[in-house]
Image: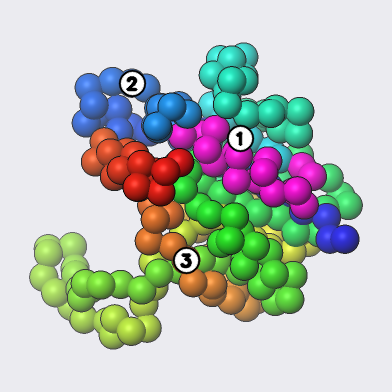
Amino acid sequence: MIRIAAIVAAAGAGLRMGKEMGSAGRKQYLELEGSPVLARSLNLFLDYGGVEEIIAVIPAGEKEQVRELLQPHCSLARVTFIDGGAERQDSVQRGLKAVGEEIELVCIHDAARPLASPALLERLLQAAEERGAAVPVIALSDTVKEIDSNGYVTATPQRDKLRLVQTPQVFRCELIRRAYHSAGERGLKLTDDSALVEELGEAVVTVEGELSNLKITTPRDLALAALMLKEAGK
């Protein structure tokens, strides 16, 4: 049986959410239909029997606070909490260092995406086991414009060749470790894990994502996620 770990990136400050809500509260701690956003993201992996290691990368100095917040909503026996870094890439790299050497597949997920489904996770694991790297994507419904620094349009890319990328993203462990090591040596900073794999010249396969797998960034996103859960009876 293939050995799987998950890294949940939850060290972000959530500045945009805090600004719009008039609060310094982190979005990953906000309540979503009775459970913290972070709890729902962790439960995706806790409820999947094949994930043996779960690393939650959280803001430094908040371990006790986070444990207390999550205890009523998660079984924390398989969750290891570690302090995050200055940026998301630094946090994920710290998470990778905490993953056991025997792990074969690593899932990297943003805590701010609490509605990813077990079916999506299953599809991604199968694809990554076969291909090495798999990411969920959704098609664009709007035309995209490329603009310059003055706001003038410079190009209109073909929409049918573009996709929006989600998480979780799943990789063979040795591949994503190599990608992060290479990025560190080159001083490369990117916001997407699979982009680091692409920089190695390695292939990344896409899997159909889910419109419901939205990222909680603003109060409107939180309200929409709550509505989706109510409609699904969850």
Q: Secondary structure at mark 1?
A: strand
Q: Which residues are magenta?
A: 37-53
Query: Looking at the rendered structure, which numbered label has been put on residue 57?
Result: 1
| Separation of marks 1 and 3 at Cα, in angstroms | 24 Å
Indicate the amino acid at tag 3.
Gly
**Splitting the image into 4 quarters, where does residue 188 fall?**
bottom right
Per the image, label 3 sits on a secondary structure element best described as loop
- 22 to 1, vertically: above or below: above
N-terminal of the pair, mark 1 or mark 2, is 2
Helix, strand or loop at mark 2:
loop
Q: Residue at x 60, y 39 (%)?
A: 42
Query: Which quarter of the rendered picture does the N terminus lie within?
Result: bottom right
Residue 86 visible, this angle: no
| Residue underneath mark 3 | 209
What residue is shown with label 2? 24
Frontmost of labels 2 and 3 is 3
- Please report contact status of discs 1 and 3: CB closer than 8 Å, yes or no: no
Please name whichever residue, 182 or 158, is drawn nearer the observer in this view of the structure: 158
Kind of residue sitting beneath label 1: Val
Spatial CA distance of label 2 from label 3 is 31 Å
